[in-house]
């Protein structure tokens, strides 16, 4: 949150809905997946809002949600063509490994602070 500077506001709904160190924010199964889905949703809404405002300003017809889904599909195909078929899976794996290491260090820190280090080891 603190590293996002002027864009940190996009994480306020996420922070209010998922409490820190909950199984949904720090869980090994859903933590990274929920953050990626949330961020892609925010990007989609922002792109839709910008396109909508531009369409209203210039008087063009407004795109529908299906149009945005098609564009996201085309972006995925472009990324696969440029970086390879497994690029997005590898990016997600890297995000998951980072989130898992963060969760494990939080757990270790909690056990050390509470004096339960023998239960952790």
Image (spheres, rainbow, N blue to C red):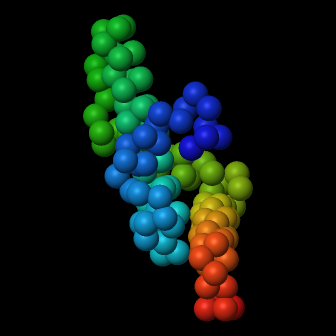
Which residue is depicted at the point 37% across and 47% down?
16
Return the residue nearer the eye: 77 or 116: 116
Estimate the x, y position of residue 74 in percent, counting from the top left.
Answer: 50, 46
Query: In this picture, is 52 found above or below 113?
Result: above
**Residue located farthest toward the top when viewing the structure as drawn:** 58
Q: How many marks?
A: 0
User: Where residue 21 appears, x then y in whole percent?
Assistant: 49, 64
For the point 30% across and 13% down, the residue is 56
Question: Which residue is at a point 64% across and 81% down the rendered structure image?
Answer: 115
Which percent across, then down, holds residue 105?
A: 67, 71
Q: Indicate the quadrant where residue 91 lies.
A: bottom right
- Left or right side of 117 for 42: left
Q: Quadrant of the C terminus?
A: bottom right
Viewer-side residue, 105 vs 112: 112
Question: Looking at the image, which residue sits at the far front?
Answer: 115
**Which residue appears at 35% of the width and 17% of the height?**
53
> Looking at the image, can residue 91 be seen?
yes
> What quarter of the picture does the N terminus occupy?
top right
Q: Is residue 100 visible?
A: no
Is 85 positioned to the left or the right of 64 in the image? Answer: right
Q: Is residue 104 left or right of residue 48?
A: right
Percent x, y of residue 104: 63, 75
In this rendering, the answer to whether 43 lies above or below 82 is: above
Looking at the image, residue 55 lies above or below residue 44: above
């Amino acid at each position: 949150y603190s590293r996002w500077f002027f864009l940190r506001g996009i994480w306020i709904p996420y922070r209010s809905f998922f409490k820190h160190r909950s199984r949904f924010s720090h869980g090994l199964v859903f933590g990274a997946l929920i953050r990626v889905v949330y961020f892609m949703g925010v990007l989609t809404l922002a792109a839709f809002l910008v396109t909508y405002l531009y369409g209203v300003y210039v008087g063009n017809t407004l795109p529908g949600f299906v149009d945005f889904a098609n564009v996201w599909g085309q972006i995925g195909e472009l990324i696969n063509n440029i970086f390879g078929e497994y690029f997005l899976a590898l990016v997600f794996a890297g995000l998951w490994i980072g989130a898992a290491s963060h969760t494990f260090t939080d757990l270790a820190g909690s056990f050390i602070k509470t004096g339960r280090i023998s239960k952790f080891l």
